[in-house]
Amino acid sequence: MKTLFKTEQGKQAILSLYDEKLKELKIAHKFLKVNTSFGETNVIATGNSTNPPIILVHGSNGCAPIALETYPNLHKTHRVYSIDVLAQPNKSAGTRLSMKDDSYGKWMIELIQNLNLDSVAMAGFSFGGLVILKTLEYNESRITGVYLSAPAYIVNGNPLIALFKIFIPIKRYIKTKKPKYIEKFLTELFTERDEFAFKFLSKVFLEFDMDFTPVPVIDAKNAANIKTPITIFAAQHDIIFPGKKMLKRAKRIFPSLTLDNLLIDSKHVQSENQNRIIEEVIIKNPI
């Protein structure tokens, strides 16, 4: 299996934090190893199998336990499948897919088919939004509805702001290993302090081959063809995918947009309370 971990020691350190987070959640679960033509995909399944199914897709440089923590009560009402996205610091294969074609959509549909899901909802944060929208573009026939939080692939922010507030701090941390650069990164992107994110990203930035490819945006014609109900939660102070700009374009290009919400005072990564709001919408308005 191809790996993007730089060293075996680094891999073990990152996966140890992965296991630590999962254990901390205290949620009954099982691991599913699903074979796809793009590589083996790790899935954490939790919740009663008779409940409505939902797939969770984490953001860039993330993992399935983080997605489970984001919506910690969802397993009480749904059968939750939290996916380790390929080529991310987690337990799935290191196959890096292109964001410019339909690879992510093909991979996800294979995954859904191999999980024997005839109809399923999806929820994703940030890069997870891109994965979900790529799935809808490729084949939306099995998707009942999607919930997107600060999603990629709709709009992008100012690249100069991203350079100075995100990428330069990352590069400086990699070069110097000084924690202050991680703190700077977190302050710009996280609405509230996240100690696990600090520990996890401190390892990931040093020990994992990250993808710095620019994120594309969905073509308006493709968006117009999507019929699946879409719910979007945009973040007011998101410097990567600006909230107001996102909702303005989303309302114009998605005829299936059924609910949109601007999270006031939210940076790119939502606070615990903001995630509870999103979780309540998913639970009370199943699609």
Image: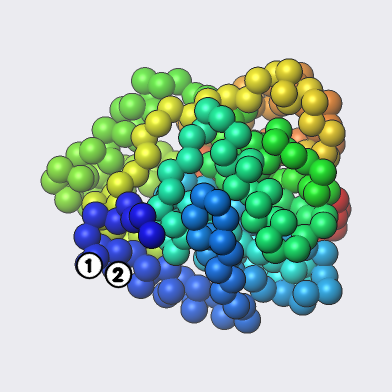
Q: Judge by depth and name the residue closer to the eye, 230 or 161.
A: 230
Residue 263 coordinates in the image, percent (x, y): 65, 40
Label at residue 232: none
Q: What residue do we see at 39% from left, 24% from top?
A: 161
Labels 2 and 1 touching (C-beta < 8 A): yes
Q: CA distance from mark 2 to mark 1?
A: 5 Å
The residue at the far left in this view is 176
Label at residue 12: 2
Q: Secondary structure at mark 2?
A: helix
Horizontally, residue 13 falls left or right of residue 220, namely: left
Vertical relation: 11 (above or below) 231: below
Residue 157 coordinates in the image, percent (x, y): 49, 24
Residue 240 coordinates in the image, percent (x, y): 48, 31
Vertical relation: 75 (above or below) 126: below
Vertical relation: 29 (above or below) 3: below
What is the number of callouts on the image? 2
Q: What residue do we see at 65% from left, 20% from top?
A: 219
Q: Name which quarter of the figure residue 53 lies in.
A: bottom right
Q: Name which quarter of the figure residue 69 lies in.
A: bottom right
Q: What residue do we see at 17% from left, 50% from top?
A: 177
Amino acid type at image mark 1: Gln
Q: Secondary structure at mark 1?
A: helix
User: Quick check: can you spot residue 197?
Assistant: no
Label at residue 9: 1
How busy is the neighbourhood of tag 2: few (under 14 within 10 Å), some, or many (20 plus)?
few
